[in-house]
Image (cartoon, rainbow, N blue to C red):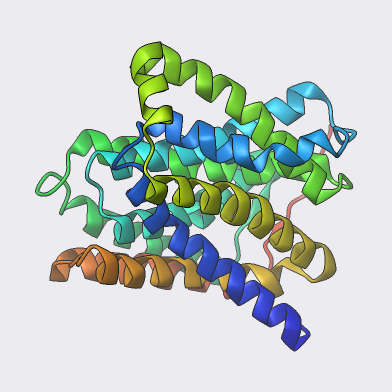
Amino acid sequence: MKPADVSLAVLVAVIWGLAFVASRLALDELPPALMTALRFSIAAVPCLFVRKPKVSWPLLIAISFTLFLGQFLAQAYGIAHGVPVGLTSVIVQSQALFTIAFAVIAFREWPTRVQTLGIAIAAAGLLLICTTVGYDFSVGAFAVLMVSPVSFAVGNLLLRRAKGAPMFDLFAWLCLTSAIPLFALALVSDGPAPTWHALTHMSLTALLCMLALGGISTSIAYWLWGRLLRDYRAAQVVPFALLVPFVGSAASSIVFSEKFGPLRLAGMLTVVGGIAVMLLAKRPRVVPVIVE
């Protein structure tokens, strides 16, 4: 990769890591559904200037509801209900484990031995983290948070079917498709009056966090990431995502004085280590389907 593109990949990882902190600050004032709806509304502004890509509505909705709505709503709910920001950033990146697992089912892309080792390591790390659940946050919050990497993984695989679509245009319309049902969910779950009050009494801090989440972390960062994936092999780009949990955990420890016990820290490091093994391994082999 060119040095400039390496810098861009690192920048995107830093932006995504800091986004977890911005989400936590915004959730101090906004309910999860409303915060996520605002995030995607801001990121959907380019839809005023770009046409819908040549992707069918069913596919667009399916990608939107998994890659964006499901992933980020589950994240917001988990953080709002006490799951530490640093831990959340690690759990979300476990999507690599689920992506490989679902690829076996959907495309018969069997993992290599090294990737299988990485899956085992990451799974062991998740089990370690599970043993710490229930002390400082509920089992229910952790269960909902686990929807995030699963949705992320499904969205990754569905995104393959939108091959050839302009990345910036596609992500803008994915955001729009997520924002509309999320606003409806906020009105139903929180009520019209509380929703309106939260919108009209937002502090400057929350507003800046939302602008950063929608305009920078979602719109610009995803566009840059898409460009990198377009210009380079995935094996060259995807490993930079390993920086995200480290940035998220470091920023959370500074901003919120977040600390981790030995068992949870060991679990987090084990998960990241397993993901590193998976991402740095060679591509899985595809077993052809034999039609009799």
Question: Which quadrant of the view contains residue 228?
Answer: bottom right
Q: Position of residue 10 (x, y in %)?
A: 59, 76
Residue at the location (55% across, 68% down)? Answer: 13
In the image, 145: left or right of 277? left
Residue closest to the eye, 209 or 91 = 209
At a point 78% along the width and 49% down the height, the residue shown is 168
Can residue 26 be seen here? The reply is yes
Quadrant of the image containing the C terminus: top right
Q: Residue furthest left?
A: 135
User: Which quadrant would residue 75 be assigned to in this image?
Assistant: top left
Q: Quadrant of residue 175?
A: top right
- Which is nearer the eye, 110 or 227? 227
Residue 147, image x, y percentages = 42, 37
**Residue 239 can be seen, yes or no:** no
| Quarter of the N terminus within the rendering | bottom right
Q: Which residue corresponds to the image point at 17% horizontal and 39% vertical from the top-left?
A: 138
Q: Is 220 displayed left or right of 186 in the figure?
A: right
